Amino acid sequence: FSSTSSNNSSSGVLPPRYETLYNKYSEVRRVLGSQRLTLAEKILYSHLDNVEESLLSNTNGGRDIRGKANLKLKPDRVNMQDASAQMALLQFMTCNLPQPVIPASIHCDHLIVGSKGADEDLKAGIATNNEVFDFLESAGQKYGIDFWPPGAGIIHQTVLENYAVPGLMMLGTDSHSPNAGGLTTITIGVGGADAVEALVGAPWELKAPKILGVRLTGKLNDWVSAKDVILYLTGRLTVRGGTGYIVEYFGPGVETLSLPGMATACNMGAEIGATTSIFPFTGASSRYLKATNREQADKDAKNFENFSRGSGQDSFFKFKADEGAQYDELIEIDLSKLEPHINGPFTPDLSIPLSEFKKTVQEQKWPEKLSAGLIGSCTNSSYEDMTRCESIVKAAEQAGIKPAADFYITPGSEGIRATLERDNTLQTFEKAGGIVLSNACGPCIGQWKRQDDIPKGTPNAILTSYNRNFRGRNDGNLETMNFLASPEIVTAMAYAGSTTFNPITDSLTTPDGKEFKFPAPKGLEGPQTPFEAGREVFQVQSGAPNPNVDVAISPSSERLALLEPFEPFPDSDLSGLRVLVKVTGKCTTDTISAAGPWLKYKGHLPNISENTLNTAVNAATGEVNVAYDLDGSKHTIPELAKAWKQRGQPWLVVAEHNYGEGSAREHAALQPRYLGARIIVTKSFARIHETNLKKQGVVPLTFANEADYDLIDAGDEVATVGLYEMLKNGGQGEVSLRVTKKDTGKVIDIPTKHAVSKDQAGFILAGSALNLLAKGN
Ligand code: F3S
């Protein structure tokens, strides 16, 4: 590799990935002229399939395409976690290709239950899920996809440590994939069908995001971490505030953050609904690449920034925004003024400064006893996080204090685990009574068998350093109040066993009656010597595709089932649909397709469909998971959906705002489709879910007038007006719903809005995106 810093050299040779990026970027510059670009735009637009067509779709050029143009993108790689990889691979298999056209990886992380500790849990997890792991491993071998076995680590940590390098564009079949934005990539969380599009080389479509700039100044104080930046932002922007935006961090404060800190902030951008988040390439990024044994990647990135084949500043690709780049929204945060935050319960945007938390707990009558503190996960298991927590544990140990609440630690990867073991950090946690869980998602995704066995329905409070806290998410108990905080705050509060304890101002009493105040946490950004690889059995399996490998699925399997294509759209508008259920309140992808024990059916569509909408609240009665048939008989929602499927009765769901927020869970689109849903009509949708619905051939519509939600009820008969025409016209045209009231027979026309693009109209007409792709191969 060589490059040059000369302004007009063409003699340099770039590694292939940067050669492609540079060529595309040169096209972007040619088309946009002197337009100033944000960092996100530079990387994103340099992955366009057809630069000119996309960027000139608006005569005012690039800035004006934001929020308007449909970008057709060619990502560099795809990363899949085990729960979503099953469906992605089952879909990929129906396309009959020998291997994906871009590199990909599978990470076995979601299926291991956390309970007694890593070794025991992992054994049990492998025994329970062997069939699925075998399927994924054999698919990896057959198609030449990297396979990270159970225990190797959580997808986002593994990707950050191994695959993320500045300038890449990746898709990940998990909503926290933007974690890799901390290392200056554009990484977007998608469903399996999107992943398959990228794997087969079809351009992947995205509405050009707007850019939300977050300018950081100052430097974090002792007890404050990068997690608090995003906890604070989530409170300020709410779970919908980032929808349609890429969050781009910049400003002098960025230089003061560690690389994993930046990744944490990007990870939790998912909580504000952002398309993704990104940080510039800094000294910390460079140090992280070296610490993770990627000196060459660091050199390549730096050389690339100094490479040019043209003249003038715009002929260089710098991993930061152009001077004068415009943001659609701008938020300024002075890191020096930020204090720790605790967010929750039940929603990540209920953000409370630590100094006000005690008062809030008492006013709201939340439990004052803290039953468990959990640190780690894909969000916060860096060397820095863990060594900061270690300093707290050591101080407490010297004072003779043990944690008053259960204390769990989840390392994000075998690499980080082995390094923390080498440096004695894990031993410090264990000596204090902490339980080190396996390198897997565990309690973060409902895979938690609690030691304290708190009966379901018992109100209690837990504190985690994870990213998401929907009701029931961690232990399946709807009354567990789950608060989010930085790992150091979680650790200190676990010692107090109290939700009203403020480690910055309050003291604990030692066994010999002395007053003990935690010193401010201190940690190391990274290890003194590079990361350990860890145990052999947890290393990646990688190799060329082997067509002789059989990806066998037993016909009697309860976990895996080959897919049948969905039927195409009829040659007319839809009629005779019935409203299966009208949902009130939050309807997340967890509500539509619950995780926890259901994760085991991710590869078996008929079986997992038994959970469809099983925590949705019926708007008419307030009951959870209750729907009424046309004769008035009472059923669970999935039971009624199944009965209607058997009767050939197509249906729709009516819901409120941000329908489908939460994990990028394509099952939340696949299951209703499988059971007979044709339309979902809401006040608004979460972006990924809306796209997923269209890919599975379900039509997402929103009320043109929000108040019309009140006009339509469960059991009403619905016909579409203009839908078929709109689809035939590639997404152009108005659609309304003609509703015949179940009780009175009165007919009402309800106008709706849609965001169906030309390609998506094609998916819906074909029955699903996959139907179209399979035709193409
Ligand atoms: Fe896993 Fe939780 Fe992260 S489910 S990928 S640890 S958000």
Image: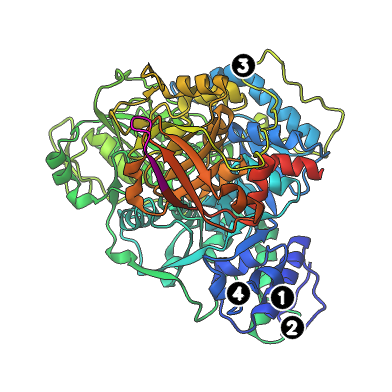
Residues rendered magenta in the picture: 742-749
Mark 2 lies on residue: 310
| In this rendering, position of residue 395 left or right of residue 644 | left
Tell me where residue 250 appears, x and y as whole percent. Answer: 46, 69
Gap in Å between the C-alphas at discs 2 and 1? 9 Å
In the rendered image, is residue 653 in sight?
yes
Q: Earlier in the sequence, mark 4 or mark 3?
A: 4
Q: Earlier in the sequence, mark 4 or mark 2?
A: 4
Q: What residue type is labelled 3?
A: Glu
Front disc: 4 or 2:
4
What secondary structure is marked by label 4? loop
Gap in Å between the C-alphas at discs 3 and 1? 51 Å
Quadrant where the C terminus sits is top right
Mark 4 lies on residue: 58
Nearer-the-camera pick, 631 or 175: 631
Tell me where residue 192 appears, x and y as whole percent. Answer: 63, 40
Q: Which of marks 3 and 1 is nearer the N terminus?
A: 1
Q: Which of marks 4 and 1 is nearer the N terminus?
A: 1
Mark 1 lies on residue: 26
Q: Earlier in the sequence, mark 3 or mark 2?
A: 2
Q: Which amino acid does label 2 sit on?
A: Gly
Residue 584 vertical position relative to residue 633 in the rendered view, above or below: below
Mark 3 lies on residue: 558
